[in-house]
Image (cartoon, rainbow, N blue to C red):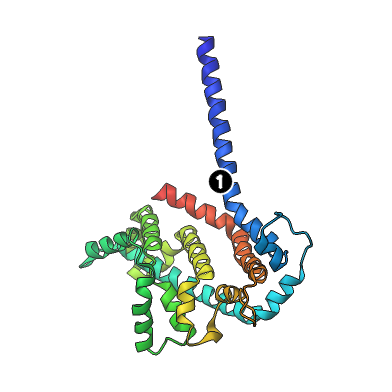
Amino acid sequence: MESAVKSRRLSAKAGRVCGILFLVVMILFTLYPIIYTVLGSLKTNAELTAGGSFFPEEWQFQNYYQAFVQADFVKYTANSVILAVSTTALAVVSCALAGFMFARRDFAGKKILLALYTSMMFISLGSVTLYPIYQFLQNLGLDKSMAGLVIALTGGQAVNVLLVMGFVKGIPKELDEAAIIDGCTIYGVFGRILLPLMKPILAVVALFVFRNTWNDYITTLIMTITNPDLQTLTVAVVQLKYSVNAAAEWHIMLAGASIAIIPILIVYLLCNKQFIAGLTAGAVKG
């Protein structure tokens, strides 16, 4: 009996050690690119491209000044903020409405639409869709406006719609029925009853959309080719790689990338509790 108990304890300890080691390795893999970017941004271009030591030989803080001036960060940061906030607001509203309709209402073609939404979770069309989207916006006269860019980045919310739908399904239908008996219309049920209860999952959707919009590069690059004034911070950072002499300046680009990381980190730190609460609530209710 004693040997069996000891072996169980040893197995439990070995499992904990393996779990801790796994977490440490995953943390290192996650943090290493960020640490490398920050340290690389403080090196000279020659030192960075030559490799050598992990830490800078001399800390080049002027790289950040050059990145800020060359990229016109005030202008492009404003573009990124406007784009990310507008896209997030539109996506949250559309996902809330679509999730509510899928979860609570029956209508013609519901199963087909739901199947299409579900299939989009496993199919990545990527850049194949860029040209049709650009043509569509061009036909509407929105290809050179911020509104067109917002519409382009708001599409493709299948995962978020299904997250909201699963959350709403976990809310008892008796609340809807009680509200209807009290004289609420479908709009009243959604706005007064369900919408306040959907705040946790909508916070998760908002964070996902804000992060994806802020970090988006290829869609924003294609959609702003004809109007460079609409370029976002992510696109501007990549342009920092080339100086006026067309020489690759990786240290300046890494400095710009380090600055561009700061806003999304601030948003996550401010909304961390809502993000965790939304994921937990969704897991329990779904």
Percent position (x, y) of residue 34?
A: 62, 58
Looking at the image, residue 192 sits to the left or right of residue 271; the answer is left
Q: Is residue 185 visible?
A: no
Q: Residue at x 50, y 13 (%)?
A: 4
Residue placed most toward the observer, 105 or 80: 80
Percent position (x, y) of residue 141?
A: 39, 90
Residue placed most toward the observer, 117 or 10: 10
Q: Residues within 10 Å of mark 1 (few under 14, many from 20)?
A: few
Percent position (x, y) of residue 137?
A: 38, 84
Quarter holding residue 118: bottom left
Residue at the far left in the pictured view? 108
Vertical relation: 209 (above or below) 170: below
Percent position (x, y) of residue 41?
A: 69, 65
Looking at the image, residue 59 sits to the left or right of residue 177; the answer is right
Q: Can residue 248 be seen in this view?
A: yes
Q: Residue at x 49, y 77 (%)?
A: 221
Looking at the rendered structure, the kind of residue marked 1 is: Met
Residue at the far front in the pictured view? 50
Q: Is mark 1 on a helix, strand or loop?
A: helix
Residue placed most toward the observer, 102 or 41: 41
Quarter holding residue 36: bottom right
Quarter holding residue 96: bottom left
Residue at the far right in the pictured view? 58
Residue placed most toward the observer, 224 or 189: 224
Q: Residue at x 67, y 80 (%)?
A: 70
Looking at the image, residue 38 sits to the left or right of residue 121; the answer is right
| Residue assigned mark 1 | 26
Residue at the far bottom in the pictured view? 141
Vertical relation: 64 (above or below) 56: below
